[in-house]
Image (cartoon, rainbow, N blue to C red):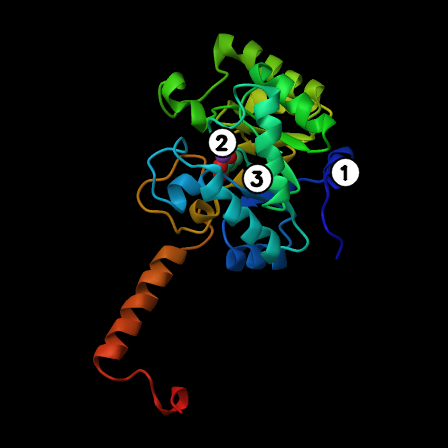
Amino acid sequence: RRATRVHHLAQWKAEGHKWPMLTAYDFSTARIFDEAEIPVLLVGDSAANVVYGYDTTIPITNDELIPLVRAVVRGAPHALVVADLPFGTYEASPQQALENAVRFFKEGGAHAVKIEGGERVAPQIAALTAAGIPVMGHVGFTPQSVNGLGGFRVQGRGDAADQLIADAIAVQEAGAFSVVMEMVPADIAGQITRKLTIPTVGIGAGNETDAQVLVWQDMAGYTHGKTAKFVKRYAAVGDELREAARAYATEVATAAFPGPEHSY
Ligand code: KIV
Ligand code: NA
């Protein structure tokens, strides 16, 4: 099997081949997704929520995220590994974006980075691309801006569609190789997907995008509490793990574990 690189994604768009992306945050899970032939893995700043237990993605730092990138790269020899740049590490200037993206490349071994925003981050996308760092854009609902956007709300409805389209185009023109669209009406996402030459990756963006992404814990039923409408659960890993932990606890209490076959 060949490793997936950014030019393959462009090729897949030309061929009309839809591809899946999942998040990953550790070696063991990355290895499983690589075996499942998931071609693109995102070390999302959603690690803030699902790994570190923060309420939003805002607090996560480079020092918290970069070690997870390194682990995923080690676990997934075939996947294209994309890393999110944390909030506060790229907004100030192209220079700031470059310095921090370089850390994700040199220390993390990432193959690409993702930054949130449309027109407002076009100079950053251009600077990273010029330095040889492939960039995935992210428009629509951008979780790092949750305070400015007034909560988890669908973006690009009605009159806001024009700005969303302008943002997606700005990201492409700045040199991004792909763009995530989060929580936007399916018809607008489809329209943008047909307009852009780079692949679009949807999350809560309907089924007309070129690719889809989900946080793996949401996809696998390993998340606490209520999930967003756009999540589909393909397994109940949380229930399975809880049952396993209970069964283990019971067997320890009753001395059923370890048995002779597990003893020296
Ligand atoms: O951090 C993340 O997991 C993401 C995706 C859901 C797009 O940005
Ligand atoms: Na993210």
In the depicted view, which residue is nearer to us: 76 or 251? 76
Residue with the mark numbered 1:
7
Mark 3 in CB contact with mark 1 (< 8 angstroms)? no
Residue with the mark numbered 2:
204
Residue 236 x/y as whole percent: 40, 55
Quarter of the image with the C terminus in it: bottom left
Q: Is residue 97 above or below residue 211?
A: above
Quarter of the image with the N terminus in it: bottom right
Residue with the mark numbered 3:
83
SS type, badge 1: helix
Q: Is residue 10 above or below residue 25?
A: above
In the depicted view, which residue is nearer to us: 81 or 18? 81
Instruction: Please indicate whether residue 182 sits to the left or right of residue 19 in the image.
Output: left
Residue type marked 3: Ala
Mark 1 in CB contact with mark 2 (< 8 angstroms)? no
**Circle nearer the N terminus (1, 2):** 1
At horizontal 73% and vertical 34% (from top left) the residue drawn is: 13
Decide if residue 184 is in sight here.
yes
In the depicted view, which residue is nearer to us: 206 or 71? 71
Residue 172 x/y as whole percent: 68, 22
| Residue closest to the far left | 253
Residue 261 x/y as whole percent: 40, 90
